[in-house]
Image (spheres, rainbow, N blue to C red):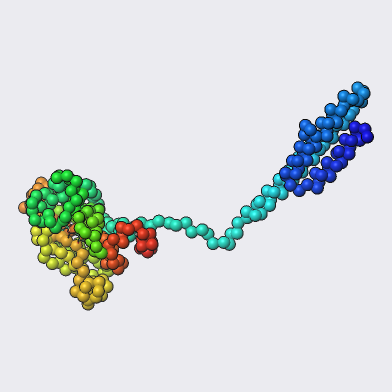
């Protein structure tokens, strides 16, 4: 068989193999075996040295023609197989748009944050400013300026985490009263502020006490502020929070920084005052401590108590949330159990 005949046979066999192959790996094998360095075409080209010099160009160009043709055919087939593979992959990957979507868990603001924001909105609507104070506080503001000097028995009412003799984590938001009063410029108008934030006490945790909880302080100072203003303000708050039918009752109490001091009760939102388990069958729910700002507290903040008067209150949003949603254990707010927190998503 002449070299040309060998090449023709080889071309024919290889074309058949190319057309029969159906995967990229075997196509690559064909390419390596036929066109590679050790393949038959290279072999033929090597055998040219035995040909008569005048035959060499003819056979050489024929061998190149066969090689080019086979290379083209292999490339064509590769493109076809690759396209098929891609189409198959796409077909397998196709999405079923009728399947339900994957749920992406979404966080929600904590219910205590929502309560605080709700109360903030009510007071902003009445022209109050929101002022925040430091959680690490000086003894001076937390106690002294609140009319509770060192060794005063009233310090026992708020068991305290001290950092040093003069520094503590605040036991109530009342120190923000002193911080705000000493800075207020009354020539620009009355002082009306609320101050929400975290407070800390060395209380033993139980269902209704936590060593960390929230308070919202309220303070109004101006000329001619009376208990009537306090009662009206608290009534407005309670109606907005617990419904238009709510009433507020003030009972005498004691805080060193208010005089007179009162506890405010709201008529029970559950039974309307008839008596039920929420109000412990009294018809009333204790909701906050308040009173008229003590003249000494005004004076310590540089305000003349003969000219100015004010009222202040401190309420616990944790207890309000417990009452409103029937949460039985205050510790649930702080355990970071998302099953508990998620219950309030829609609130
Ligand atoms: C005070 O802290 C006063 N500073 C409130 C005040 C402000 C009175 C301005 C007058 C004028 P008291 O210790 O009662 O008061 O706390 C206020 C509220 O914080 C309570 O009504 C209660 O809702 C909440 N509270 C107190 N201790 C705890 C506790 N351990 N866990 C959860 N809530 C608490």
Q: Residue at x 15, y 64 (%)?
A: 263
Q: Position of residue 75 (x, y in %)?
A: 76, 40
Residue furthest top as drawn: 53
Q: Residue at x 58, y 59 (%)?
A: 97
Q: Quadrant of residue 346?
A: bottom left
For ligand 1, give the image quadrant.
bottom left
Q: Position of residue 136 (x, y in %)?
A: 21, 47
Q: Quadrant of residue 214?
A: bottom left
Residue furthest bottom as drawn: 274
Residue 224 drawn above or below residue 325: above
Residue 290 drawn above or below residue 247: above
Image side of residue 107 versus residue 209, left or right: right
Label total for image: 0
Q: Residue at x 24, y 55 (%)?
A: 212
Nearer the observer, 137 or 118 = 137
Nearer the observer, 201 or 275 = 201
Q: Position of residue 184 (x, y in %)?
A: 17, 47
Rendered-image quadrant of the C terminus: bottom left
Q: Position of residue 30 (x, y in %)?
A: 78, 40
Q: Is residue 287 visible?
A: yes
Nearer the observer, 90 or 158 = 158
Nearer the observer, 345 or 235 = 345
Residue 310 drawn above or below residue 276: above
Q: Quadrant of residue 238?
A: bottom left
């Amino acid at each position: 068989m002449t070299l040309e005949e060998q090449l023709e046979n080889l071309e024919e066999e290889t074309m058949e193999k190319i057309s029969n192959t159906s995967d990229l790996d075997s196509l690559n094998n064909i390419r390596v075996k036929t066109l590679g360095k050790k393949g038959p075409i290279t072999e033929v080209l090597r055998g040219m040295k035995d040909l008569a010099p005048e035959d060499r160009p003819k056979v050489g160009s024929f061998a190149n023609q066969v090689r080019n043709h086979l290379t083209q055919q292999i490339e064509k087939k590769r493109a076809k197989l690759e396209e098929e593979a891609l189409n198959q992959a796409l077909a397998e990957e196709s999405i079923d748009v009728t399947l339900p979507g994957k749920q992406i868990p979404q966080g929600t603001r904590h219910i205590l944050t929502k309560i605080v924001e709700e109360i903030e909105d009510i007071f902003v609507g009445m022209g109050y400013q929101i002022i925040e104070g430091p959680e690490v506080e000086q003894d001076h503001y937390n106690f002294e300026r609140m009319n509770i000097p060192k060794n005063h028995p009233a310090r026992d009412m708020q068991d305290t985490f001290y950092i040093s003799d003069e520094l503590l984590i605040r036991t109530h938001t009342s120190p923000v009263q002193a911080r705000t009063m000493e800075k207020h410029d009354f020539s620009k108008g009355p002082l009306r502020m609320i101050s929400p934030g975290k407070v800390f006490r060395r209380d033993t945790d139980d269902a209704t006490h936590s060593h960390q909880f929230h308070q919202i302080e309220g303070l109004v100072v101006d000329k001619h502020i009376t208990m009537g203003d306090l009662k009206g303000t608290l009534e407005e708050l309670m109606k907005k929070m617990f419904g238009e039918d709510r009433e507020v009752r003030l009972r005498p109490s004691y805080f060193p920084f208010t005089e007179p001091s009162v506890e405010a009760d709201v008529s029970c939102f559950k039974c309307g005052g008839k008596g039920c388990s929420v109000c412990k069958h009294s018809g009333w729910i204790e909701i906050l401590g308040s009173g008229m700002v003590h003249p000494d507290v005004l004076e310590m903040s540089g305000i003349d108590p003969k000219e100015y008067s004010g009222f202040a209150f401190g309420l616990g949003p944790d207890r309000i949330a417990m009452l409103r949603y029937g949460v039985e254990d205050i510790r649930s707010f702080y355990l970071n159990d998302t099953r508990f927190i998620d219950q309030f998503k829609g609130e």
